[in-house]
Amino acid sequence: MSKRKVRTRSLITLYLLLAPTLISLFFFNYIPMYGVIVAFKDYSVYKGVFGSDWAGLKYFAYFLNDAKFWSVMKNTLILNFYDLLFGFTAPILFALLANEIFARGFKRIVQTISYLPHFLSWIVVAGLVHQMLSPADGLLNMFLKSAFGIDPIYFMAEKEMFRAIAVIAQIWKSVGWSAILYFAIIAGIDSSLYEAAMIDGASRFRQAIHVTLPAMVPMITLLFLLQLANIFGIGFERVFLLQNPLVYDVSEVISTYIYRVGLEQSQYSLTTAIGLTQSVMAFVLLVVSNRVSKKLSGTGLY
């Protein structure tokens, strides 16, 4: 029996394990892509996708000349920038700091507690945020009043505070779970590197900077590229559940805009055109950033 046949037979089990994923990916991700045709048609629910009249680039031109859309795009980019600046770096810092805890039992407790918010739905998290920041009986307002005599503040209605609240809520919910990959990298670092650094007189801070952090760089690069590719989009649930009409000017992002225009106003062609443009821009950004990363650091997604 040839080596090729032997190798093929040995990989059959792996192919069978991979098959359900490929099938589900094909049916739920690729087949529905025909729906992008809606972006180029005056879509009517009664006529269907293929029966609706052709509109060409009408809806693309419409939203590109719409001041409301650019305001929404601005809000999306700003909130994503804050997520990238603070939300992306928080798990890295958390992993580095947790690694400095010498008591193994206490370290496990800290890690376990940090994971728990990830398993809460955004409905629960948003409810906790609203309750904590409530001007009537919120914990923060009660503390400010008792400690400093400050009158109750309606935090959720302050435009200047919405983005900070959204980013902090995201960090609290995901920092522990996002740090798991970094914990795995740190656990795999050869202990002899730390011993050599200690012999050279390196402090714990120097060890973290020159031993731990460099080992994390490849994973940091990969996760950064994935998050950068999503900079034109943002999770719907977080923003939708935290926003209110008083802060729409700074909180309306592409995902919530598509919901209000597409579902509430039934402008399916317009929102499909926006979604398609958003996906194309994200794809181009991913390809460009991946090439730049490979040239600068030699690390990329592919």
Image (tube, rainbow, N blue to C red):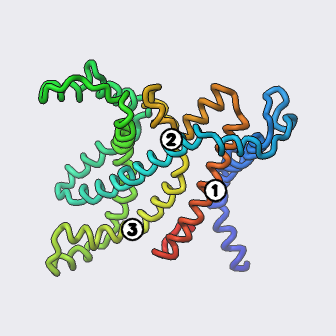
Point out the residue furthest to the top here.
136
| Whole-number angstrom distance, CA of label 3 to CA of label 1 | 29 Å
Q: Earlier in the sequence, mark 2 or mark 3?
A: 3
Q: In front here: 298 or 263? A: 263
Element marked by disc 1: helix
Mark sitting on residue 235: 2
The answer to whether one can see residue 173 in this image is no
Where does the image place residue 111, in percent across and percent down from the top left? 29, 49
Residue visible at 14% across and 78% down? 201
Density class for disc 2 (Cα within 10 Å; few <14, some 14-19, many ≥20) is few
Where does the image place residue 10, in percent across and percent down from the top left? 64, 68
75 lies above or below 137: below
Residue visible at 81% across and 41% down? 55
Point out the residue furthest to the left here.
147
- Horizontal side, residue 197 vs residue 33: left or right: left
Res. 280 image quadrant: bottom right
Q: Amino acid at mark 1?
A: Leu
| Whole-number angstrom distance, CA of label 2 to CA of label 3 | 26 Å
Residue annotated with mark 1: 18
Mark sitting on residue 217: 3
Where does the image place residue 116, in percent across and percent down from the top left? 34, 40
- Horizontal side, residue 43 vs residue 204: left or right: right
Q: Earlier in the sequence, mark 1 or mark 2?
A: 1
274 lies above or below 92: above
| Whole-number angstrom distance, CA of label 1 to CA of label 2 | 28 Å
Element marked by disc 3: helix
Q: Please state, as top left, top right, bottom left or bottom right, where the N terminus lies in the image.
A: bottom right
Q: Amino acid at mark 2?
A: Gly
Q: Please state, as top left, top right, bottom left or bottom right, where the C terminus lies in the image.
A: bottom right
